[in-house]
Amino acid sequence: MIADLEASTFQKRPCYRYIRESDKMPALGSEDGMARVKLFNPTGAGSWFLSEYDPATRQAFGVADILDREYGYIDMAELVAYRGRFGLPIERDLSWEPRPLAECN
């Protein structure tokens, strides 16, 4: 039964946008350092704190905190396509308040 649920087409994409215009994400290379969006894996390890974004390439910059904390570029297409346990996608923390990347955990 669980295998059937995991293999189903349940929730092929999130019900909301991960990055919105209202987030006012700076362009890549701006070195703003302020995490405006937090994404997380609801069924396992992983949080992503995004500070910059290029909508043309769908690349973001920020901190990925999975097993280790790592600064770098994040492929948003890869995060959108990811499905964890029970087919659940990465989620956006809707109560997240922007803060410096150095303070994200």
Image (spheres, rainbow, N blue to C red):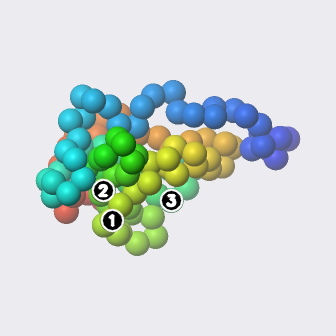
Reading the image, the residue beneath label 1 is 72
Q: Nearer the viewer, mark 2 or mark 3?
A: 2
Q: Nearer the viewer, mark 1 or mark 3?
A: 1
Reading the image, the residue beneath label 3 is 45
Residue at image position (39%, 48%) is 57
**Of 7 and 77, which appears nearest the observer?**
77
Count of numbered tags: 3
In the visual, does 8 lie left or right of 43? right
Reading the image, the residue beneath label 2 is 61
37 to 16, vertically: above or below: below
- Closer to the chain start, of discs 1 and 3, is 3
The x and y percentages for residue 33 are 16, 56
Q: Judge the density around disc 2: few (<14), some (14-19), many (≥20) Cα neighbours within 10 Å.
A: many
Q: Amino acid at mark 1?
A: Gly
**Of 9 and 4, which appears nearest the observer?**
9
* Quadrant holding the C terminus: bottom left
Pointers 1 and 2 in contact (C-beta within 8 Å):
yes
Residue at image position (46%, 70%) is 67
Q: Amino acid at mark 2?
A: Phe
Q: Amino acid at mark 3?
A: Ala
* Quadrant holding the N terminus: top right
- Camera sees residue 93: no
